[in-house]
């Protein structure tokens, strides 16, 4: 059996990972998240492998009720702020390759110290956002 193998770039193509072991490349566009919803519905049982570059602090909090989120620093320096009961916890990522696991259901945001590049594996089902 032969399989066609292509080369992709995480700057232009993210990957949807399924519970069945599938990996589906999805082109990034201005309407990326709308296209995801159209193609995958509520995203149940799927995770998004993505890459983002940040030059400034996030202007929202986000939370993933369907599972833990993997966040890996590729370059730069960033603090992830996790909203815990009665307090905030800061997780500093300052060395390329350092990562954290943001627990399911925990609101989080980021403070960028130097422009940074990060890799995410996100359980997308039910993701919520709110302003800072």
Image: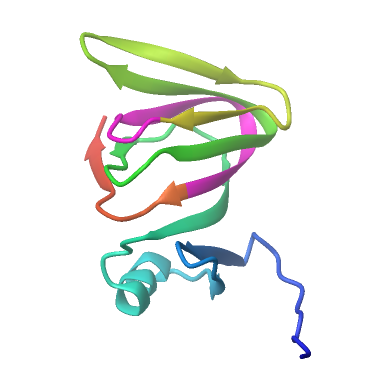
Count the numbered circles shown: 0
Quadrant, the C terminus = top left
| Residue toward you, 101 or 120 | 101
Res 130 → quadrant: top left
Query: What residue do we see at 45% from left, 14% from top?
Result: 90
Res 62 → quadrant: top left
The secondary structure making up most of the magenta span is strand
Q: Position of residue 53 (x, y in %)?
A: 59, 45
Query: What residue do we see at 54% from left, 66% from top?
Result: 21
> Magenta includes 118?
yes
Decide if residue 115 is on the left or right side of residue 37. right
* Residue range (magenta): 103-121
Q: Which colouring convention does the figure follow? A: rainbow
Does 102 sit above or below residue 66? above
Q: Position of residue 40 (x, y in %)?
A: 35, 73
| Residue toward you, 47 or 74 | 47
Quadrant, the N terminus = bottom right
Query: What residue do we see at 36% from left, 60% from top?
Result: 45
> Magenta includes 82?
no
Which residue of the protein is positioned furthest toward the bottom in this rendering? 1
Decide if residue 44 is on the left or right side of residue 4. left
Which residue of the protein is positioned furthest toward the top in this rendering? 86
Q: Position of residue 30 (x, y in %)?
A: 44, 69
Does 92 sit above or below residue 52? above
Query: What residue do we see at 24% from left, 52% from top?
Result: 126
| Residue toward you, 78 or 3 | 3
Decide if residue 127 is on the left or right side of residue 82. left
Decide if residue 77 is on the left or right side of residue 123. right
């Amino acid at each position: 059996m032969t399989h066609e193998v292509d080369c992709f770039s995480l700057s232009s193509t993210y990957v949807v990972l399924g519970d069945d072991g599938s990996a589906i490349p999805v082109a990034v566009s201005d309407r990326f998240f709308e296209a995801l919803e159209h193609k995958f519905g509520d995203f149940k049982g799927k995770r998004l492998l993505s890459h983002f570059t940040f030059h400034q602090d996030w202007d929202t909090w986000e939370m993933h009720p369907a599972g833990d989120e993997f966040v890996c620093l590729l370059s730069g320096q960033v603090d992830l702020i996790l909203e815990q009961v009665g307090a905030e916890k800061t997780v500093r990522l300052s060395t390329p390759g350092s990562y954290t696991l943001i627990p399911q259901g925990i609101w989080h945001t980021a403070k960028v110290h130097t422009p940074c590049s990060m890799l995410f594996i996100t359980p997308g089902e039910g993701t919520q956002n709110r302003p800072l």
